[in-house]
Amino acid sequence: MKVLLLRFGELYLKGNNRDVFERNLIAKIKEKLCGEKFKFSKTFGRYVISEYEQDRENEIVQKLKQVFGLYSLSRASEIDANVEAIENEVKKLSIGNKSFKVAVKRADKNFTMSSMEFASYLGGVVLENNKDSNVDLYNPDIMINVDIRLNNKAYLYTEVEKCQGGLPLGSAGKGLLLLSGGIDSPVAGYLIAKRGLEIEALHFHSYPYTSERAKEKVISLAEKLTDYVGDIKLHVISFTKIQEAIHVNCQSEFMITIMRRIMMRIAERICEKYELGAIVTGESLGQVASQTMQSMTVTGSVIIEKPIFRPCIAMDKEEIMAVAKSIDTYKTSILPYEDCCTVFLPKNPVIRPTVKKAEREESRLDIETLINQALENEEILEIKRK
Ligand code: ATP
Ligand code: MG
């Protein structure tokens, strides 16, 4: 019978942690395959997906490759754990003139032959059935793996396909991703979710300075992310009145600094209201004036009770773009709609702002009222996994 053999990583997790990890991972696998017909079972240290529709195999594998916490998978044949059945399955292998190695692993130590004996026996079977092939123990073209497990089953496979790795979604709690329409923030969301942080998203728009299409773009990005992070609650806040107030009252070179400090305050308020434990941004050190160490000190200083996670902080743009392409957000991110940060953009933003100067500029604003008004008009969109 054809099955999928799943392996999970982070094996250093112990005791209670490991149970939570596994429960979480199993739930996420089942959720991901919801709508497919399949049977899920667990053998020691592995999961097995069986009884699925064979012509859906590629789609199922694709889905499993989006589940955080899965380390690798193999398309395998499940057979009874006896010499004859395994030998019959090995006889079916057609490897032409390639080199090969047979590796046998036994969880079942009562099996009749030792691993080494059985591997060389099966190697003989392969050679007999593939006259042009040859054995290469050090650098084989094909690894023929035979895994004999304790459930009286054996698994035969030749490929190990890499999966996401990371930790199952939700195992690190839940955070709020500041999602713009750019390249970096969707990547930040994906990377932090890979460490187990479930996410909600927050987007600021400046309608009518920014178009409805700009908001649509962010919705499409959130939709793309759902492949990895599941359904997303997207909080949408109008930033227009706040930007106008800053523009009228504050020195233009502080525009971005003050904007970002207010964005952060609103983010923290949303975290409190919806019980989210961290703020996540797509900032990368030195990328632009608002992402210097000093700027981040000044924007971060308004946050009191939450950590700010910046998964892209040490990544080059090229590296961020490569991830964006791999999760298919890149094409959407480069669509040319404006972000609210580009409205009223000053010619010369301060590169080394200080908290003191920022506070002086902010003293000309009624920040509390501006924030409350913005929050009163919060719009919430439920972005569902397709
Ligand atoms: P991105 O590619 O993610 O837009 P960026 O390089 O354009 O990032 P900035 O515009 O300086 O950088 O934004 C830095 C971070 O601030 C973003 O990664 C995002 O987390 C957050 N951010 C910026 N604009 C918005 C917005 N309109 N709504 C929500 N978050 C935003
Ligand atoms: Mg941006």
Image (spheres, rainbow, N blue to C red):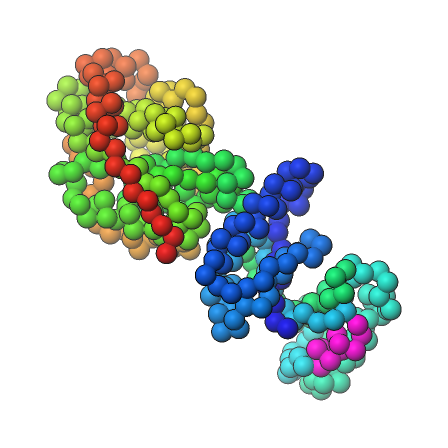
Our reading of the magenta stretch's main secondary structure is helix
Which residue is depicted at the point 18% across and 23% down? 246
Name the image quarter holding the C terminus. Answer: bottom left
Which residue is depicted at the point 54% across and 45% down? 168
As rendered, which of 338 and 67 lies closer to the eye?
A: 67
Where residue 214 sits, quadrant-wise, is top left
Q: Examine the rendering and report whether any part of residue 347 can be seen.
A: no
Which residue is depicted at the point 19% across and 48% down? 213
Q: Residue 202 magenta-drawn?
A: no
Q: Residue 83 magenta-drawn?
A: yes
> Is 182 placed left or right of 109 in the picture?
left
Up-down relation of residue 71 to residue 56 (above or below): above
As rendered, which of 263 and 16 lies closer to the eye?
A: 16
Q: Examine the rendering and report whether any part of residue 311 can be seen.
A: yes
> Is 158 placed left or right of 184 in the picture?
right
Where residue 121 sits, quadrant-wise, is bottom right
Up-down relation of residue 90 to residue 260 (above or below): below
Magenta part of the protein: which range? 82-91
Residue 125: x and y in percent read 77, 81
Name the image quarter holding the N terminus. Answer: bottom right
* Count of all numbered marks drawn on residues in the image: 0
Which residue is depicted at the point 65% across and 42% down? 18
> Is 40 placed left or right of 110 in the picture?
left
Residue 116: x and y in percent read 83, 67
Residue 79: x and y in percent read 71, 71
Residue 135: x and y in percent read 74, 75
